[in-house]
Image: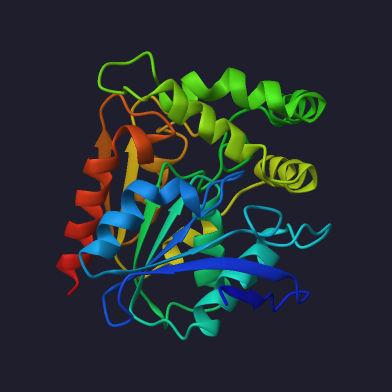
Amino acid sequence: MPYFESPVDAARLHFVDYGPAGGPVVVFVNSSYFGTEMWEYQMLPLAEEGYRCVGLDRRGHGRSDDVWGGFGLDSLADDLDGLLRHLDLRDVTLVGHSLGTAEVVRCLTRHSVERVAGVVLVAGMVPGIVRSADHPGGVDPDLIRAGNETFRRDRAAFFADGARAFFALDLPGNELSAAYVRSMVDRCLGATARACAALGDLVATLDVAPELPKLDLPVLVVHGTHDTSAPLELTGRRAAELLPDSTLKVYENAGHGLFATHAGQLTADLREFIAARA
């Protein structure tokens, strides 16, 4: 059965495992609010081509348990490491989106890179968007906290009203059907209120900048020019500068949801990155 017990608290966590067991292994780590369905346009074609594609539903997301605790970055990273160990995955390419990139980074610095051969950070929140002494150009933390309060009052409206900016639908080339966008909003509402609130609080304090120089392995950083959730200069470009072995690819007109609007381009870049290490 596609479940395993979290090493943190024995919460039952759901995963998907597509493609042949002997193929190159790609593990996908989701954005906040989404389950593994967000990677539809990457996981399915890659699995059909012989890759083994694994995805984890974060606690409180998708088909994983609805729990109160375990939403600190260390615990979330331990859940990811638990999946790698449960399936005994090796020579893995870890692909994270948004806050999922922070889980990837913390998993590697908290545990080890032994099982991982390469990393892809897609529209990542890392190193963090909040202003600090070491990051004076970041966002005022009071603005983040105020946004979190608005989110708590009406997260349904937050998701629905924010979809156009998330996918940058007003820019050329970002055509998605209204049905698809609506389905993704509905998917976000499948994440529990507790999980959503806890992850919002995590973003308000996120800072993994000191950890990035420790990642001594190849990293592909993919980011959009019009990402309003994780602005390029605060996240993707800054992450690429801090990483010792990184390649930055910037997608023109792409927003935070480039996994859908630029699906083919992202999938091709994943293939190329994995092939370069084969």
Picture coordinates of residue 195, whole percent (x, y): 74, 48
- Callout count: 0
The structure residue drawn at horizontal position 50% and vertical position 62%, both measured from the top left corner, is 104
**Residue 79 seen:** yes
Q: Quadrant of the N terminus?
A: bottom right
**Relative to residue 216, is residue 204 depicted above or below?**
above
The structure residue drawn at horizontal position 32% and vertical position 16%, both measured from the top left corner, is 171
Q: Is residue 179 left or right of residue 19?
A: right
- Residue at the far bottom: name it: 88
The structure residue drawn at horizontal position 72% and vertical position 42%, both measured from the top left corner, is 196
Nearer the observer, 96 or 193: 193
**Relative to residue 81, is residue 151 depicted above or below?**
above
**Residue 228 seen:** no
Picture coordinates of residue 162, whole percent (x, y): 57, 22
Q: Quadrant of the C terminus?
A: bottom left
- Residue at the far top: name it: 170
User: Please, which colouring scheme is shown?
Assistant: rainbow
**Relative to residue 269, is residue 203 depicted above or below?**
above
Nearer the observer, 145 or 56: 56
The structure residue drawn at horizontal position 50% and vertical position 78%, both measured from the top left corner, is 84
**Relative to residue 136, is residue 273 depicted above or below?**
below
Residue 8 in which image quadrant:
bottom right
Picture coordinates of residue 39, whole percent (x, y): 41, 50
Nearer the observer, 239 or 220: 220
